[in-house]
Amino acid sequence: MRRLNAPLVVGLVLTAGLVALLVLPEVVSLPDPHLGVHVQMEGRKLRLAPFAPGEFGYVLGSDMVGRDLLSRVIYGARYTLGLAAAVIVLRAVIALPAGLRAGWTGGRAARIVQAMAVGFGSIPALALVAMTLGGLRWLVPGQKGWLATYVAMLVLSGAPRMAEQVRRRAEEIVVPHVEAARALGATPWRILRRHVLPLMRADLAVMFSSEMAWVLLLMGQLAVFGIYVGGTVAVRGDGWIRYIEYLPEWGQMLGANRTAILGSPWIPFFPGLALGVSAAAFHLLAEGFRLQGLRQG
């Protein structure tokens, strides 16, 4: 009797939940994530935001200017998961050709990929990205420039490791499986497309899922240090001013409100929870794919 692949099942369930978050705003009417009610009436008293979970109909509470936190977390799935997916795609665009070429030809190309992986791997990704982005933050003009720099650092911090993983796997496949095709006169591209890549499908599924988990974790860790995409806007009232994040992106929601952890802990907690659950979902998915590959292999 085959044992249940629990990590794969749980990972698929959690991933299905994330997909549901992506489409939920299209099928359910949610409060505008950018608009809030800063003042509420409680009996004869006026209450100012933030409002705790359960108060005034806010399921997860509100932020500092009365915006619905549940709505912002749901809408934030599109920004955060989309950003992480874009980082993975860009990593793959760099890593797959470099790793396949290095695994196919060996020699100098393989040494360069190995050296890059060792060099970038010798420094923890969090330290590398945080120090670089922290130093560049005030030198990069505009929000678009900062977004491009943020994404570029996330891509570069993981692409060499991915290329090395692809190189090792391609090297294992090329030697025993490709000699016959090469002897028959098949071109390198045909050999890669027909013989190498199909044998790497399980490895790529594990790699992409695992990288997605690490990118989400890294985005959360950077947010704790105040490094996130987007910026803040000033909201002015009668005698007060507050600086709040605008985009409902989980990392930005966590980072911009990290100082509220003592007074209004729900504001940074739920975006952080969303990041953690999402990372766990893709990590379990990667482990499930790995176990599935071992059983089939």
Image (spheres, rainbow, N blue to C red):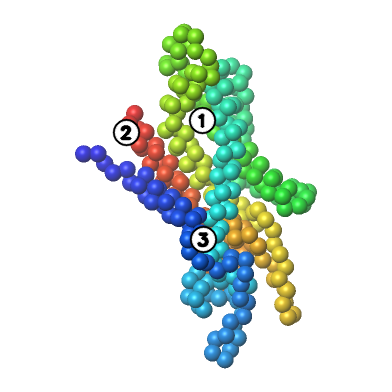
Q: Identify the residue at image location x=49%, y=18%.
A: 191
Q: How many residues crowd around disc 1 within 10 Å: few (fewer than 14), some, or many (20 or more)?
A: many
Q: Residue 147 in the image: state x and y as whole percent.
A: 68, 49
The disc, 3 or 1, on the residue closer to the chain's N-terminal end is 3
Cα distance between the residues tagged 3 and 2: 39 Å
Q: Amino acid at mark 1?
A: Gln
Question: What residue does disc 1 label?
Answer: 165
**In the drawing, does residue 224 fall left or right of residue 289?**
right
**Quarter residue 41 falls in:** bottom right
Say which of 177 and 163 sits in front: 177
Image coordinates for residue 193, horizontal then vertical, percent:
49, 23
Question: Quarter of the image holding residue 257?
Answer: bottom right
Residue under numbered circle 2: 295
Residue at the farthest front position = 27
Q: Is residue 256 above or below residue 156?
A: below
User: In what quadrant of the picture does the C terminus appear?
Assistant: top left
| Quarter containing the N terminus | top left
Residues at discs 3 and 2 in contact (Cβ within 8 Å): no
| Tag nearer the camera, 3 or 1 | 3
Q: Read off the residue under disc 3.
A: 25
Q: Nearer the viewer, mark 3 or mark 2?
A: 3
Q: Tag 3: residue type?
A: Pro
Q: Position of residue 48 (x, y in %)?
A: 61, 80
Seen at 67% across and 56% down, the residue is 230
Q: Residues within 10 Å of mark 3 (few under 14, many from 20)?
A: some
Residues tagged 2 and 1 counted as in contact (Cβ below 8 A): no
Tag 2: amino acid: Arg
Q: CA distance from mark 2 to mark 1?
A: 21 Å
